[in-house]
Amino acid sequence: MLLFSSLISGLAIGSMYGLLALGYHVTWAVSRTVNFALGSSMMLGAVFCYSLAVTFGWPILLAVPASLVLCVLYGLLVERVAVRPFRQRNSDAWLMATVAAGILVDNIVLFTFGKEPRGMPSALAEAPLMIFGAGVMPLQLVIPAVGIGIALAFWAASKYTGYGKAMLAVVQNARAAQLMGISVPAVIMFSYGLSALLAGVAGILIAPLYTVSSTMGFLFGVKAFAVAILGGMDNPWGVVAAGLIFGVIEAMVIALFGSSYTYILTFGLVIGLLVLRPHGLFGRAGVNKV
């Protein structure tokens, strides 16, 4: 029963890691940059949703889309202010700039939202369901379904929509895409908005199972980046699968050994796997043409 409950919990949290890792993949594939403010995007999704739904009393069906729109705007702002100026100068300073943007936003939320963690109410996280003798929150079943559904929607959109095809064209050859009339800067900005959207969804979904605070996104962001590297940054399905694997392993470690050993064993395993598979579990080594 304990292992089954841990499996369900691991799939739920792993889906969140997968969504965040997919956000890292999107910006990396399109622009070879990484949005290190993605953890703060996740935090903003939860904080915005809590503020609108609980503090201001908005219906949840309005609070959720409004929160996601605000997350997208934040992602666009990060690209415009913390990434584009440095890319235009062929500088790698975007790395530190996105980190700084995330820290800045975390502290702004700390002083405006407050430092006390708050519980996000949800009908799906009130009473557990008994499955095979184990208590499982309905939200823990909903989260993996939503996470995998979003990953499938992302794949379908990249294949069958105009903007998705534009993104694939930029990924394959940015210069050729520009010659075909595709605005590469607009596609890169879109990728940052999309990555923030994915992070915002993760934050809103996980908020009722954790607490909403200004610091909630940091560890999620670090773990998700480890997941993205583990899955292979250029492989969207790889990062999602790695998120599920990481989440299940983490939950099993907590169940068997306690939370004190979580980071030691999980990140130790990540390091060991990367030693064996430097390009990730599902990544492939690049081909150098001479």
Image (cartoon, rainbow, N blue to C red):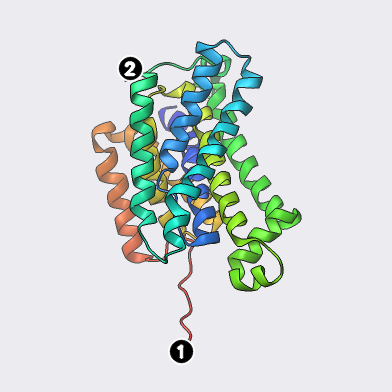
Residue identifier under label 1 = 290
Q: Is residue 232 above or below residue 260?
A: below
Q: Is residue 40 left or right of residue 181?
A: left
* Position in image of residue 242 (x %, y %): 47, 50
In the foreground, 287 or 27:
27
* Residue at (40, 16) in percent of width and height: 118
Q: What is the total number of numbered labels drawn onto the structure image?
A: 2
Location of residue 61 by image quarter: top right
- Residue at point 25%, 38% (across, down): 261
Secondary structure beneath dot 2 equals loop
Q: Position of residue 241 (x, y in %)?
A: 51, 50
Q: Are marks 1 and 2 in contact (CB under 8 Å)?
A: no
Q: Where on the picture, by quarter, is residue 263?
A: top left
Up the image or down, 21 lies above or below 253; here it is below
Query: Dot 1, crowdedness within 10 Å: few (<14), some or many (≥20)?
Result: few
Q: Amino acid at mark 1?
A: Val
Instruction: Please tell me the numbered disc located at residue 237.
Output: none
Q: CA distance from mark 1 to mark 2?
A: 57 Å
Image coordinates of residue 257 in percent, x first then y, are 27, 35
Residue at the location (47% across, 59% down)?
233
Kind of residue at badge 2: Glu
Q: Depth check: 202 or 135 in front? A: 202
Q: Closest to the observer: 196 or 111?
A: 111
Q: Which residue is mark 2?
A: 116
Quadrant showing the N terminus: top left
Q: Secondary structure at mark 1?
A: loop
Q: Is residue 250 visible?
A: no
Neighbour tally class for label 2: few under 14, some 14-19, many 20 plus, Cα within 10 Å: few
Q: Is residue 143 left or right of residue 278?
A: right
User: Which x, y percent locates residue 53?
Assistant: 56, 15
